[in-house]
Image (tube, rainbow, N blue to C red):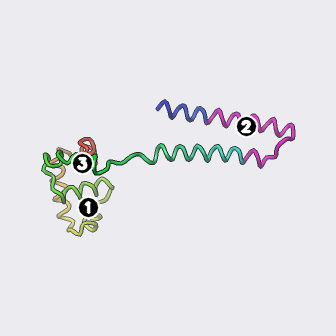
Amino acid sequence: MKKTILVFTLLIVALYTIFRISKYSLILGGTTIEFIITAIAIVFFIVGIYINKKSLHRPQNTPENINHQKIKELEITSREYEVLQAISEGLSNKEIAEKLFLSESTIKTHVSNLLVKLNAKRRTQAVQIAKDHKIL
């Protein structure tokens, strides 16, 4: 959090500095307005790239990081695990059924089994518990 505050503080200081320099350069007649707009656009472009890399590309759990022992302990079948992964993607029962070529009632059964095995009351809670156990 401190790093984010520092980045935005530096951004504000940089923009303030650019605006102050542009004000004086326009008064003195040394630069054109197009140059100033370009400089501001470049600063925003660089900050946008930085924010994109830091916030949107968080590392996902790779197959090596998944706790297969915990899956066995919870007695989650491979099909239930596929359903759990689909739930974590935000798919509905109908979409999961279409994706896995199963009936919707079968998916409902798998979801119910997952909720019991993970001791969860809702699908979102099941996903969170699975992430806490490093299953997803």
Q: Nearer the viewer, residue 19 or 93?
A: 19
| Residue for point 24% across, 66% down | 100
Q: Which of marks 3 and 1 is nearer the N terminus?
A: 1
**Residue tagged 2:** 19
Classify mark 1: residues with Cα within 10 Å, few (<14), some (14-19) or many (20+).
many
Q: Which of marks 3 and 2 is in front?
A: 2
Mark 2 is on which residue type?
Phe
Mark 1 is on which residue type?
Asn
Mark 3 is on which residue type?
Arg
**Residue tagged 1:** 93
| Residue for point 82% across, 38% down | 25
Label 2, label 1: how many angstroms apart (C-alpha)? 54 Å
Classify mark 3: residues with Cα within 10 Å, few (<14), some (14-19) or many (20+).
few
Q: At which x and y percent is residue 16?
A: 69, 34
- Badge 3 marks a residue whose secondary structure is loop
Q: What's drawn in magenta, residue-wise?
A: 11-37
**Residue tagged 3:** 122
Question: Which picture quadrant has residue 119?
Answer: top left
Question: In the current view of this chain or complex, which residue is farthest to the front?
Answer: 64
Label 3, label 1: how many angstroms apart (C-alpha)? 13 Å
Residue 22, placed above or below residue 60: above
Q: Which of marks 2 and 1 is in front?
A: 2
Left or right: 54 in relation to 19: left
Question: In the current view of this chain or complex, which residue is farthest to the right?
Answer: 29
Q: Main secondary structure of the magenta part?
A: helix
Q: At which x and y percent is residue 98?
A: 27, 68
Q: Which of marks 2 and 1 is nearer the N terminus?
A: 2
- Badge 1 marks a residue whose secondary structure is helix
